[in-house]
Image (cartoon, rainbow, N blue to C red):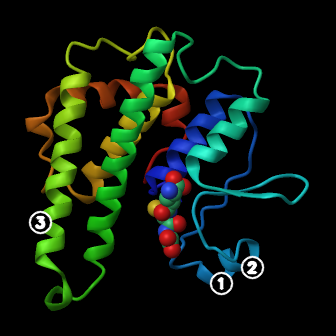
Amino acid sequence: MLDSPYVRRTAISLRLLGIPFTHRNWSVFRNFDEFRRVNPLVKAPTLVLDDGTLLTESSLIIDWAQSISSNAPLMPDDAAQRLRATRLIGIAIAASEKSVQIVYEHKRDEDKRDAGWLHRVQGQLRSAYDLLEREVDGANGWLFGNTPTQADVSIAVAWGFTQIVAADVIDAEAYPNLARFARQAEQHPDFAALPPV
Ligand SMILES: N[C@@H](CCC(=O)N[C@@H](CS)C(=O)NCC(=O)O)C(=O)O
C-alpha cells in the first residue's frame, strides 16, 4: 500500500524512470494470506517481474529499475553530489524506518508498549529530521537541479509518511524548510499520481 514509505518511494521512482507497473493495493496485515501466495516473505514493496522473478527491498528494486531505464537517472552524475544524495537518502530511510517502528509499537496494547524503546526511536526520528531540515535549508525546488533525484523522492515521501503517523513527534511547524520542500515535491505529477492515502 502507498501508505508504506518504502512502497511509495519505489512506485514514484518507477514512474520517474518510466517503468510501467500494475499496483495491487494490498496490506501486509489485512491481505496477509493473499500476499503470502505471491511472496512468502510478505514484504512490501514486492515487485513481480513479467517472468515471475520476485524482487523485494525498495533500494534494490529502484537500483534494478534504474539499470533498465532509458530515462534520466535518479542519482546526480557528479561524484560529490552523488555522495551527498546517498547520505541524504540514508537519513530519509532512517526517518521512514523510525516512523514505521513507532507505528508497530502502537499496535501493541498500551500497557504492553515499551516506553524506553519508544523514547529512543522518537529521539532518532527527531535527529533524522533535524539533519534533513538543515540540508533543505534555502533549497528552492529540487535539491540537485531541475528534476527530482532519489534524495528528493525519499525525503519528501518520508516526511509525508511521518506527518501521517507521527505528527505528534515531528511538529511540522518546527521544520518549515522540510514542510515547504515536501509541499512542492507533492505537486509533481508522479508524486500526485501516487498519494500516500
Ligand atoms: N528495508 C525494506 C523495508 C520494507 C518494510 O519493512 N516494509 C514493511 C511495510 S512498511 C513490511 O513489509 N512489513 C511487513 C513485515 O515486515 O512483516 C525496504 O526498503 O523495502
Q: Residue at x 25, y 76 (%)?
A: 106
In what element is the residue under mark 1?
Answer: helix
The tag earlier along the polypeptide, 2 or 3, is 2
Q: Marks 1 and 2, Cα distance to the nearest angstrom?
A: 6 Å
* Cβ atoms under marks 3 and 1 closer than 8 Å: no
Percent from the top left, x then y, of residue 123?
14, 55
Check contact, mark 1 vs mark 2: CB within 8 A.
Answer: yes
Q: Residue furthest right?
A: 51
Q: Is residue 12 left or right of residue 68?
A: left
Quadrant in the picture for residue 152: top left
Residue at 33%, 73% in the rendered image: 104
Q: Is residue 136 above or below residue 39?
A: above
Can residue 86 be seen here? The reply is: yes
What amino acid is at disc 1?
A: Asp
Mark 2, residue position: 37
Q: Tell me how many marks there are.
A: 3
Which one is in front, 79 or 41?
Answer: 79
Q: Which mark is residue 33?
A: 1
Residue 119, numbered label: 3
- Camera-side residue: 138 or 83? 83
CA gap, disc 3 to disc 1? 33 Å
Three-letter amino acid code at disc 3? His
- Residue at 38 percent across and 31 percent down: it is 87
Q: Quadrant of the C terminus?
A: bottom left
Give me the residue at 53% from left, 27% from top. 189
How far across and down, in percent of the image, does residue 15 sit?
64, 34
Q: Label 2: few (<14), some or many (≥20) within 10 Å?
A: few
CA gap, disc 2 to disc 3? Answer: 37 Å
Q: Residues within 10 Å of mark 1 (few under 14, many from 20)?
A: few
In the picture, measured across the screen, residue 36 lies left or right of residue 124, that is: right
Instruction: Name the front one of labels 3 and 1.
Output: 3
Kind of residue sitting beneath label 2: Arg
